[in-house]
Amino acid sequence: MSSHVPFLAVRPDEQFSSSVRKSTRDVIKTNMDSPPLARAPPPTYAASRLPSSVRFVLLVLLSFSLSTVLKTLAANYAGAQLALASRKVDEPWQISLFIGWKVVQLTIGWVAGYDYEDIAALTLLTNQPYYYLLHAYYALPLLPLAISAFSDIIAFTLPFALLRPLTRAHDPATPRMAHGGNQALAMDTQIMVLTSALAATIYAVAFYLEHQFFHLGEFLITHFDNLATMAAHDTTVAQLIPLFAILGLAASFFLFRPTIAAAGISPLRDQKTRGSLSAARAPKRFNPATATLGETFAYNLGYGTSGWSRRAEVLAKRTAVLALGTLVNNAVRVFATVDGTDVGGALGYAGIWAFASVLLGVAYGALSHEE
């Protein structure tokens, strides 16, 4: 529409004059040479006027308050079933462990700059192994587990939604062609479905192999008392994938979308454009004498002579947070709340899921790798 404005702004007898044609060319050239429209400034939230330290304190207080209220409400519907596999949580060490770990989780999410979508996905990813254990090996019904898991997610997510706006990677107001098409890729529904299916498959295959070749069943019997069933030992990959579908979606949201939306060369650009950009950037040559440990590690993984790309850096950090969060969160929850569990069993079970998270990060790294 903008290219027709010059013709609408003159009289009919002037449309073919040389001065008007020159003016039209100037307007078109100006429009083509102008930079893309800048993103509109984000709306001002009342919470954004508060200092960051104050918002973080409010975040912690609100999260603990929500957790208390939601767990109390959930106990009316799910408490009896969960009690079948739970040990009593009233020792000072148990309470201190839960409080300390929750503060650490909130601190990591706040310092890392995660928004509520990140936190919702991360909370689901790091808590799902705990609920899968109760369902697959203690035969607890899905409904009470879903109620408890939902209360976990809300207690972490709602404070971030109130006190921190969406990041650029998740904000639908971000221009679709930001960063040369990366944002469009990150928001594409088909890509989200495929990457979610990939994540669910990786989790399913990893868990299946653990049962079939690494004697997971024997490990659980050794370290866990009062197991109700070992039917999970006979499940196939095809049966596990639907169970892990929601986990795959969360993994796509937390790992793949922020990675693909990170600044870098878009895989949709042609070779000529990519070549000119590479020449303009002139990446430094890898020097083992001056390279940092991270650059050396990235170089050996094939990420280029200049070390980590922006995408690789984002993916590596988020994968580390996911793997560490999965390991610690499930070790803490399983050992402190599941009856008849020892430290070795809790760590071993949590480690299986943490390892699967690392495998997923590697797969997403290969999928989003920039040449």
Image (spheres, rainbow, N blue to C red):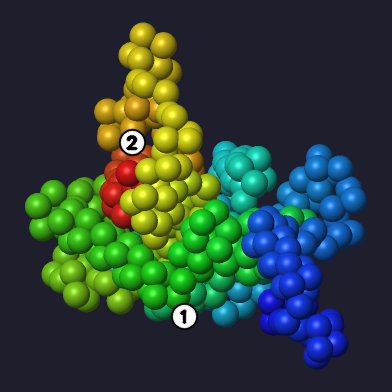
Height in image: 144 above or below 87? below
The one nearer the camera, 115 or 225, is 115
| Disc nearer the start of the sequence (1/2) | 1
- Depth-wise, is mark 1 or mark 2 nearer the camera? 2
- Residue 316 figure quarter: top left
Q: Are marks 1 and 2 in contact (CB under 8 Å)?
A: no
Q: How crowded is mark 2: few (under 14 residues within 10 Å), some or many (20 or more)?
A: some
From where the camera sits, is residue 31 visible? no
Inspect the image, locate mark 2, and give the three-letter code of the amino acid beneath it: Tyr
How many discs appear? Answer: 2
The amino acid pointed to by label 1 is Leu
Viewer-closest of 364 and 215: 364
User: In the drawing, what numbered circle is on residue 165?
Assistant: none
Among the 4 quarters of the image, the one containing residue 226: bottom left
On the image, the x and y values in percent for residue 264 come to 48, 46
99 with respect to 142 (left or right)? right
* Residue 278 as seen in the image, left or right of residue 224: right
**Looking at the image, residue 14 lies above or below residue 147:** below
- From the top left corner, tell me how far across and down residue 311 is, in percent: 45, 45
Mark 2 falls on what kind of element? loop
Residue furthest to the left: 213
Q: Is residue 109 visible?
A: yes
The residue at 47%/80% (across/down) is 143
Question: Which residue is painted at 42% across and 23% down in the image?
Answer: 284
How far across and how far down the image is residue 157, in percent?
64, 62
Residue matched to label 1 = 143
The CA distance from mark 1 to mark 2 is 44 Å
Counting from the top left corner in percent of width and height, residue 155 is at: 66, 62
| Residue annotated with mark 2 | 303
Q: Which of 359 and 185 is in front in this view?
A: 185
Residue for point 72% across, 77% down: 2
Name the residue rendered at 77%, 62% in the picture. Answer: 40
